[in-house]
Amino acid sequence: METTLHTEDRAGTSASPRDARTNGTPPVVPPPHGLGLAEFSLALGGFAIGTAEFAVMGILPEVAGNLHVSIPTAGHLISAYALGVVVGAPAITVLLARMPRRALLILLMLLYAIGNGATAVFHSYTMVLVSRFIAGLPHGAYFGLAALAAAALVPPHKRGAAIGKVMLGLSVANVIGVPAATWLGQALGWRACFASVAVIALVTAGMIAWSVPSLPTSRKSSPLTELGALARPQVLLTLLASAVGFGGIFAVYSYVASTLTFVTHIAPHQIPWALGLIGIGMIVGNTACGWLADRWLKGTMLAMYGFTVVVLIAFVFAAPHLWAVLPVLFGVGAGSACTPAFQSRLMDVAGDAQSLAAALNHSAFNIANALGAWLGGLVIAAGFGWVSTGWVGAILAVLGICVLLLSFSLERRTATV
């Protein structure tokens, strides 16, 4: 039933919030200053998070030199952030389950500002390491809650597109935010990169307070209710499909700069431009995936993973040729952008544990990041070459398809019982 506050039912009459609740569909919550500004505010938080998460990879040598550690040791800052994401997503969501969602979104952005501001001012490697862990804590919880907030602002049949618009912030960060922050870090010192992110996070907190309506939690929300998500097989299978399937993308993405250097043989200063194609692919993929997910959710999830399999196999053969690898990089970005579909799926199967399920999806992404990078590194270290990551990625994407098929099959069997 698509009956909401701002849509008309099939008889052409406007539905009230009471009608929506009666029919089991939550009413649309109108933003005080327009839907576009509310979605932009939520996306701006994603832009800040994406910029801080990926920019550090481009300024790692500067960070290592300033903190007087080796580059591999400085790389632990990335791991500390990822650990913060994995820990923070479920912990914050469960412990603050009763907190109104808008207030929690503001709190998460303030915490993100504090974590990145601390990174900008600390001079001890140990303290910077701690600050990166703190900065990672709100990451998954923010994206999960932002997706739920975006879905609450539109009718159910536009949910996927709304989530896609919010997730565009992360995609745009890869095209604009990361190069700009890298340039800023190189020109003014790496601390300026994190200071700028802290400012963006503070601006985001203010914009959310102004443009996003009050989004109270369900009366059933509680730590115990949220933990109930972990007892739902469909939630666990969706998270597993996300962790395994997206691992395929990260198996290639983690080593794509080295592959472009040693296999494609492009100049180092050209690599950021080539990587920008991945970010552009993410923007296109997010938009397309959100639109398709509203019309064909399960098919979109399978099709995106199928597309990823084809793209990653193509990467193996295209890598030696610049003209061939550039469109493949665009495809890698597009294939990685099926977050709206997975978030929508989790909303469908999580029941009353919406917040934890949505947040855990981003923990699954970070597990995918670690899994893909680890397996890709294994085959490279074993002597199979840089392009072998494409085969590893394709296998992981196929396994992701298998998990999805198992999930859908079990759902059909349960429905017929």
Image (cartoon, rainbow, N blue to C red):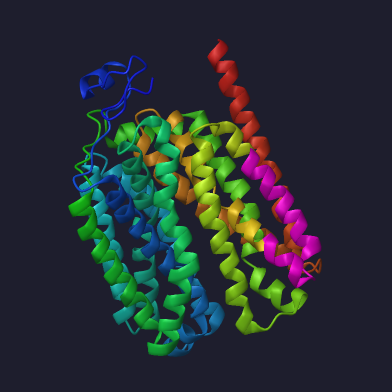
Which residue: 46% across, 79% down?
A: 182
Q: Is residue 321 magenta?
A: yes
Q: Position of residue 42 (x, y in %)?
A: 32, 53
Q: In which image quadrant can residue 124 be found? A: bottom left
Q: Position of residue 371 (x, y in %)?
A: 61, 56
Q: Is residue 79 visible?
A: no
Q: In which image quadrant can residue 377 be found? A: bottom right
Residue sitting at the far front? 12
Which residue: 75% across, 74% down?
A: 264
Foreground residue among 364 and 171: 171
From this view, report whether residue 88 is shown above or below residue 23. Answer: below
In magenta, the rendered stretch is 303-328
Q: Position of residue 82 (x, y in %)?
A: 46, 61
Q: Is residue 338 magenta?
A: no
Instruction: Determine the main secondary structure of the stretch shown in magenta.
Output: helix
Which residue: 51% across, 29% down?
A: 233
Residue sitting at the far top? 417
Which residue: 34% across, 48% down?
A: 146
Foreground residue among 366 and 264: 264
> Split into 4 quadrants, where in the image is the C terminus?
top right
